[in-house]
Image: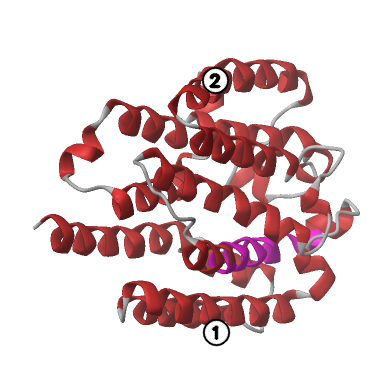
Amino acid sequence: MNLFLKLSRPRFWIYELGSFFIGVIVVATSITDLLKFDTLLFAFYFLFPANLLIYGINDIFDYETDKLNPKKNQYELLLQKEKHKSVYFAILLINIPFIIYSFFVSIPVFLCMLAFVFFASFYSAKPIRAKARPILDSLFSASHYIATGVFGFYLLGGQDFPALGVIAGILWAMAMHAYSAVPDISADKGANLETVATYLGSNTTIIMCGIFYILSGIIFFNLIGVYAIFGMIIYIVLMALSFGKDEEGVFRVYKYFPLVNTLLPMIWCIFYMYQKFG
């Protein structure tokens, strides 16, 4: 069990859970909505099983690349080849019951679940293996996070498709993904793995991320107000601190992202719920 917990990257759990929670609170009419059985059940799903699916599949299909990446032996875990079958089995065993249950909740919820599983799986898995296709890698990575948010939206009875929120979220998540690929440029090139960062280069990728954060901030400003501009400025500062740095320098900045990506949405959620529920 300890292996599966490590594989699921606990420091990144908040990403899927946060996307789900944002979708939920936008539709929730009271605090009790957050305590409903389905809400708590799928909060658990997007906390652990979903992340085991994402990162377990990622580590299986990235084995040849990960062997060349020193980060996998220090900051993360290198999944040995003899353990791949047991990880496949654990992913299926833990995820399938939630997928089946989502079908009985509603069709929109089930479709969002399928979208999440598709983008999260084929980001790494063959035959698509989007992570080895520049630009498509960032789009697939962003799409499974956004599918999770829309899942939460429909779980509590959301009606109209939240198009502006989806566009802004995809831009923000694409920037997050592209930036995370910059510290891995050398390892990915060594394994002949093309990513948005190996394709564009470090500085161009960081500039692209900055542009995406700005566009996302502008759209979110129309949805949530001035708080979006405050958040956008923080990400622009992080991009500026990364520009012109070598991979180690970028990685030092990147290690702050889990904290920033946790605190900013959390602060917004607290204020939003206070205003909405009093």
Q: In terms of sequence position, does the residue under pointer 1 or pointer 2 come before the other?
A: 2
Is residue 174 highlighted in magenta? yes
The residue located at (47%, 59%) in the rendering is 162
Dominant SS in magenta: helix
**Outermost right residue:** 192
Q: Is residue 93 above or below residue 276?
A: above
Whether residue 245 is visible, yes or no, is no
Q: Are marks 1 and 2 in contact (CB under 8 Å)?
A: no
Q: Nearer the viewer, residue 259 or 40?
A: 40
Tell me where residue 187 appears, x and y as whole percent: 79, 56
Q: Is residue 141 above or below residue 53?
A: below
For mark 1, what is the residue?
240
Q: Is residue 214 left or right of residue 28?
A: right
For mark 2, what is the residue?
100
Q: Is residue 28 left or right of residue 206?
A: left
Residue type pointed to by label 2: Ile
Q: Is label 2 in a helix, a strand or a loop?
A: helix
Q: Nearer the viewer, residue 168 or 253?
A: 168
Residue 186 image label: none
Q: Which residues are magenta?
A: 171-186
Tell me where residue 77 appears, x and y as whole percent: 62, 37
Q: Quadrant of residue 126?
A: top right
Whether residue 5 is visible, yes or no, is yes
Residue type pointed to by label 1: Ala
User: Local crowd at mark 1 within 10 Å, few (<14), some, or many (≥20)?
Assistant: some
Tell me where residue 86 appears, x and y as whole percent: 68, 15
Measured Cα–Cα span from mark 1 to mark 2 = 45 Å
Q: Is residue 158 above or below residue 85?
A: below
